[in-house]
Amino acid sequence: MTRDDVTEPGVSVVRGMKAAYALAWQACPGMLLLQLVTAVIGGMAPVATAWLTKIALDEITAPAPRAGALVWMAAGIGVLGIAMAAASAITNYAQGRARRAIGLHSQDRLFDAVNRMSGLARLEEPRFHDRLRLAQQSAEHAPDQLVQMGLSTLQGTLGIAGFLGTLVAINPVMTGVALAAAAPAMIAHLTLGRRRAGLMWRTSPGMRRKIFYQMLLTDLQAAKEVRLFGLGSFLHGRMLTELRAANSAEDRLERGVVRVQVFLAVLGALLSAAGLLWAVHAAATRTISVGDVSVFIASLAGLQSGLSVLVQGIAMGHQSALVFHHYLTVVGVRDDLAAPSQPRELAPLAGSIELRDVWFRYGEDSPWVLRGLNLTIPYGTSLAVVGLNGAGKSTLVKLLCRFYDPQRGSVLWDGVDIRDVPVAQLRQRIGAVFQDYMDYDLTAAENIGLGDLEAIDDPDRILAAADRAGVHETVERLPNGYQTLLSRVFHAGEEEDDEEGARTSGVHLSGGQWQRLALARGLMRQGRDLMILDEPSSGLDAVAEAAVHDRLRELRAGSTSVLVSHRLSAVRRADRIVVVQDGQILESGDHASLTASPDSVYARLFRTQAEGYQEDPASSAGNVVGPLPGESGAVPTSVAGG
């Protein structure tokens, strides 16, 4: 689909309205029925009022007017006026209730669909993000707009039918002229609606970039580089460039809208003038009565107004349907991980996890990241994975968590292909700490408790996880301990304008403290079948890193674990170490066996790291500096990642 093609085959206003009315019926059936009743009243009452006015005027101009009949007609006009006023007020109330309910229900469905995407593939597609952004926008407004379009169409059709019948009875020729004038208006509004929807789709990437630049200008994490490197004006200029491009496109479209609106206004005015001149001439020649003049003018105005509202409603509905298409596409999207046709139960790990002849790449045009990789992780053992950047270490972790499925080969859990197991069941058996961990703008307790939602309100579990991660004392020293909000975005009590809460919140941790908190979150899943540690100490200082890995070795003892780390000092005690290179297992063994061969890749990496802490032979004698106080020894630096 190109940027200009905003619809798929079969997309129509009818399809969009059908989906919108289904949402409305599910969200607020009572308000929908109430609006239906008021729409009928709003469509028929003006026609009835025009006819009562005609009859009243004819009675007044009759040779012997009947007072009783005039009273009843005046009373009828008054009742109709009250009915229309009450219907208008009730409609506004029902529309507000319906809009909020439909918006809530549609957004619920949208994000439920996003959560159903078990893998990461779609979230890495820029085009899907464009569609998702438009889906979020349309979820707020498009369903209600389509519902209102349908109701206004019903109301307008009832009014048009009544006025049309009246005009046909008085002057069929003027009726045909009025209907003919509606045709160009219909074509013009439908064209403009399609252009607006197409503009939103074409400018979506630019608007995403604008939001990206805005986030960089206001994000705390980016602020250091933005200010040090003087990037503010550059990013500001980029943001304005994207905004100006979008504004320019909208301006061109709006100029076209003005031309169309002027043309339609002139056409309507000419038609009204022609109708008025005919009515005055016909009344002067006694061809029609004064009442006929009244009802003709009212019907002509009502027909023009109704047609205009109807045409604009259909055009806006068409535009809303085109944008709503993105919402329908997202809520109907299939999971990027195929669900098993005959799901199998996943027993606790007892034998091994095996990657058998696994091939994987992130796209059809992308290079292979894993190339026929074979790896077995026996139950109760610790495996360390090392290698250079891009070797495939993190991809291996993603496949173990089933964020993706391999294009070829399989991942087996005690001989069971994990594709045959419900993905949620598999992930319940895995604990993990990722290198790109999250900093949640929540309390310290919630940041930890998110690792196991079943225990998020269990302070003992949370405290134990924090203690195992070595972050308990840090959290205890926060202004409100575990209930301290860790955020620079929100503050406690902001809904109640709590000034004291604002002063004692907004705490932001250092990178190392956040990493320990993420480690505690991963350790909330203590006792799971598989623990994955992807660079769990990359942001820690040497002393903290050594302490964390000592603790992790204790926690991993007797359990199955996979540790990915640049720091070879952290992996040397693993039961088994594998070196990944070019998507394959290049070397395998424990630390002693791998370093016994001086030409092995692992041995060379280890020597490279260790040499960074050895004395420089060229240094001057007498200038040898020993370990700093409290240092127990050197911790190798990082040489590779990925």
Image: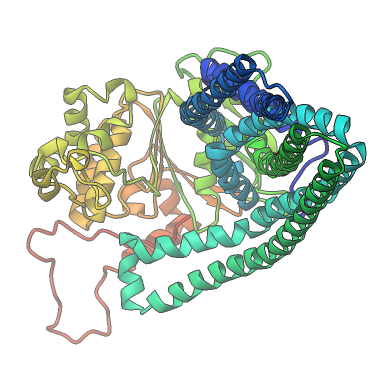
Residue at x 79%, y 28% (from the top left corner): 161
Q: Position of residue 446 (x, y in %)?
A: 25, 34
Q: Position of residue 219 (x, y in %)?
A: 34, 60
Does any portion of residue 120 appear in the rendered image? Answer: no
* Placement of 293 over or under 424, stated as above or below: below
Q: Position of residue 532 (x, y in %)?
A: 41, 36
* Placement of 390 over or under 427, stated as above or below: below
* Placement of 371 over or under 58, stated as above or below: below
Q: Position of residue 527 (x, y in %)?
A: 32, 23
Frontmost residue, 366 versus 240: 240
Q: Which quadrant of the view contains residue 169?
A: top right
Give the residue at the far right of this rendering.
173
Residue at x 32%, y 32% (from the top left corner): 450
Frontmost residue, 180 versus 68: 68
Does any portion of residue 129 appear in the rendered image? Answer: yes
Q: Is residue 166 left or right of residue 114?
A: right
Frontmost residue, 477 versus 157: 157
Frontmost residue, 590 versus 509: 509
Give the residue at the far front of this rendering.
63
